[in-house]
Image (cartoon, coloured by chain):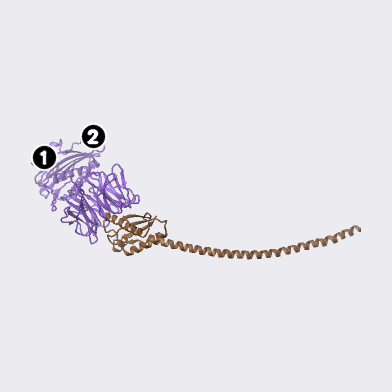
Chain colours: A brown, B purple
Amino acid sequence: MRKKLWISLALLFVIPGLLFTVSCAKKTVKEDTAVQEQQAEEDARIQAREAEQMERQRRMEEERLQEQEAARLRMMAAEERFLSEDIHFEFDSSNLLPEAQEILRWKAAWLQNNQNIQVTIEGHCDERGTNEYNLALGDRRANSAKSYLMDLGIYGSRVSTISYGEERPADHGSNEAAWAKNRRAHFTIE
Amino acid sequence: MTKSQITNHSHARYKSPGVLQMGWVMAVLRLKTVFLITIVSIIIAPAVCRAEYDYIDITNPFLRKIPIAVPVFKNTSPNKTAAQAERQASDLLADTLEFTGYFKMLDREAFLVDPQSDAIYSVVNFHNWTGIGAELLVTGQILVIDNLVEMELRLYDTFKEKLLVGKRYNGWLKDQRKMVRRFCSEVIFFLTGNRGFFDSEFAFVSTGSGNKEVYICDFDGYNPRQVTDTKSITISPAWSSDGKWIAYTSYVNGNPDLYIKNLKEKRGVVIAKKGINTTPSWVPGKFELAATLSFSGDQEIYLLTGTGKIIKRLTYTWGIDISPTWSPDGKKMAFVSKRSGAPQIYIKNIKSGQAERLTFVGHYNTQPSWSPKGDKIVYAGMAKGRNNIWVIGVDGDDPVQLTQNEGDNESPTWSPDGSLIAFSSTREGPSRIYVMTAYGTDQRRLLTLPGKQTEPKWSPIIINK
């Protein structure tokens, strides 16, 4: 009987103890969740802030890139213009016409802004003359363009010349429009 | 010489009429110790010590063409598979003689004699030929055995009833063309006192490969072959006066540089100065050439050694100086200069250094070429945007236009005897090479190749090709 009492007593203490333990554990869990939630909120805020910051940075970067791209495109366009814009001459002449001088002034400015670039000027002629004389005429056309650039402050060492005479027409037609197009100095970048 | 003398003479040559004697030649050839020596010529006619120039006076611009008959040769070959040989050889002979512009070739249809009968060869009845208007007659007898050929060719004056030139040739069948040309050369020498041009060639530029390259062909357009393979722009060929060297401009290394090449030995030098290096022109009889270089910044003509060293500068005027051409004695040089504002032709006395303007008609006169006799300069003159061939006396007298209303005509060049002028023309579309007499008559196309053919340069007589 006495033994039974002891067990009952023991149980009396142990069970609530157990109960207490259980309830205690439960309570701890509850507290942890709250902390976590708080933390999560905090994290989210930070993340949002970071994201916002990143987004801002990304936008800035994008703008910068766009700007860079635009600048690159502008440069490319300028280079494209430098390469594609030929200067033209009158028949049997290597004198620079006013238009040609204007184009050369623009080219000189571009060369000033692109100091590391070396160019070649090709002198060309139309098919009407004879090819030997045209080889000399093309030589003079290239040289007169080069001299003009040098007068505008471009170092001669940056500019080489070559004459193709009538050997490389831009337009294979045999009419005034084709001839006018072919009497030219053409620029290439090395 | 009478008719009977000729026939006697002929018979004396034949042991059995109609059969040629090939024995010893064939023996030699069969030994195969001889590789390239293929033509043996024996003078049949009593040596004509002096050519009789009264037949053709090549200085006469109103030259009457001499009516000539060239019947198909008599074929004496035992094997008739060689049957085409006599036609080929006689056609070639007729074409070659006709090329000179001196002859009116009579139509074979009108001939009164069967070419395979003895009447044409052993005993010539001259009335058969004078009757159809022939003043000259060429007869031939051909014998083909395997790949060997013997050819006997004779030129007669039908009115004087006289043998003028007679030759016998032995050799390889493939050298038949050489034999015919050699005989034609003898004929022209006899009739004009001049060696003609049958041992000459053309250098020219053609785009057949897709790029401008230098080609060479025989004087009659036969056997064209590509001699440069630059896969670039190659222009302005020029022959040395011994025909062994050729100079030209090529962009093969990017810049228009001047190449001087030995044709046979494949060696040479390059002049690669800044600017243009072009329009070579060899000094007659010397291993020197003039060319335009622009390394100074101005296009000037320089005298160079054949090894590419500058001997001296020849022009000193600001502006384009280009396209030199030498007088046959090498004492004067004609060239193109822009010193008066437009391209005109000038003549410079090398010793005195004086230059005088030659052309005053037109505003664009270029590409001069000095005649082999020294009295004329042929050039391209432009009017209304078209180039045409003109010829002018070296004293500046009487510029005469030789081509008209037929496309662009450029790059004139003289045959080595001065009797013909070749040039390029776009008269039939793409540029081709044409030949005419020095007086502008008989204009005909020399050859047709794929692409465009430009810048013909007639070689000197090339001996020991």
Whether label 1 touches label 2, CB < 8 Å: no
Numbered circle sitting on residue B28? 2
Indicate which disc, 1 or 2, sits on the residue closer to the N terminus: 1
Q: Which residue is mark 1?
A: B7
Residue at the image position 83 percent from the left and 60 percent from the top: A14
* Outermost residue toward the right in this view: A1
> Is B21 placed above or below A112 here?
above
In the image, B435: left or right of A8? left
Q: Secondary structure at mark 2?
A: helix
- Placement of the C terminus of chain A among the 4 image quadrants: bottom left
Q: Secondary structure at mark 1?
A: helix
- Placement of the N terminus of chain A among the 4 image quadrants: bottom right
Q: Position of residue B224 (x, y in %)?
A: 27, 48
Same chain for mark 1 and mark 2? The answer is yes
**Residue nearest the viewer, comparing A12 with B98:** A12
Hey, which quadrant is residue B425 in on the image?
bottom left
